[in-house]
Image: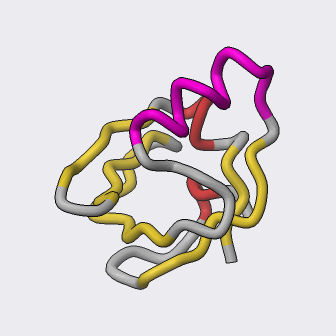
């Protein structure tokens, strides 16, 4: 499911990133890799705030819809 639809405060595993190569590389540098784990802190109007490693990231709706988690 896309990260924008995932439940809050539950550890999730990134399954796939459906973005172009430039965006994938940028997300990888931020810690969002296939098989990495993250936790959704909040979700508003499709945008999400996620905890990755020891940091937090805010992702807008367009990027959040391209990250698939389980």
Dominant SS type (magenta): helix
Camera-side residue of 25 and 49:
25
Q: How far from the left and from the top, in percent, is residue 34?
A: 68, 59
- The region drawn magenta spans 19-30
* Residue in the image at 48% along x and 72% along y: 37
Residue nearest the observer in this picture, 36 or 57? 36
The location of residue 26, given as percent across then percent down, is: 53, 25
User: Looking at the image, is 47 positioned above or below residue 53?
Assistant: above
Residue at 77% from the left image edge and 21% from the top image edge: 21
Looking at the image, residue 50 lies above or below residue 26: below
Identified at 58% across, 42% down, the residue is 64
Quadrant of the drawing holding the C terminus: bottom right
Q: Residue furthest bottom?
A: 10
Residue 11, quarter of picture: bottom left
Q: Residue furthest top?
A: 22
Residue 53 location (% of width, % of height): 29, 62
Left or right of 2 in this view: 6? left
47 in magenta? no
Taking the magenta stretch, the answer to whether it contains residue 23 is: yes
Image quadrant in which you'd find residue 1: bottom right
In the rendered picture of this protein, how many numbered marks are placed on residues? Answer: 0
Query: What sort of colour scheme is used for the picture?
Result: secondary structure
60 on left or right of 9: right
Residue 61: x percent and y percent? Answer: 55, 33
């Amino acid at each position: 499911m896309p990260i924008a639809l995932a439940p809050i405060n539950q550890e999730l595993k990134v399954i796939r990133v459906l973005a172009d190569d430039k965006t994938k590389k940028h997300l990888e540098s931020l810690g969002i890799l296939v098989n990495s784990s993250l936790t959704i802190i909040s979700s508003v109007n499709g945008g999400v705030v996620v905890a990755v490693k020891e940091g937090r990231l805010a992702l807008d709706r367009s990027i959040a819809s391209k990250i698939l988690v389980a």
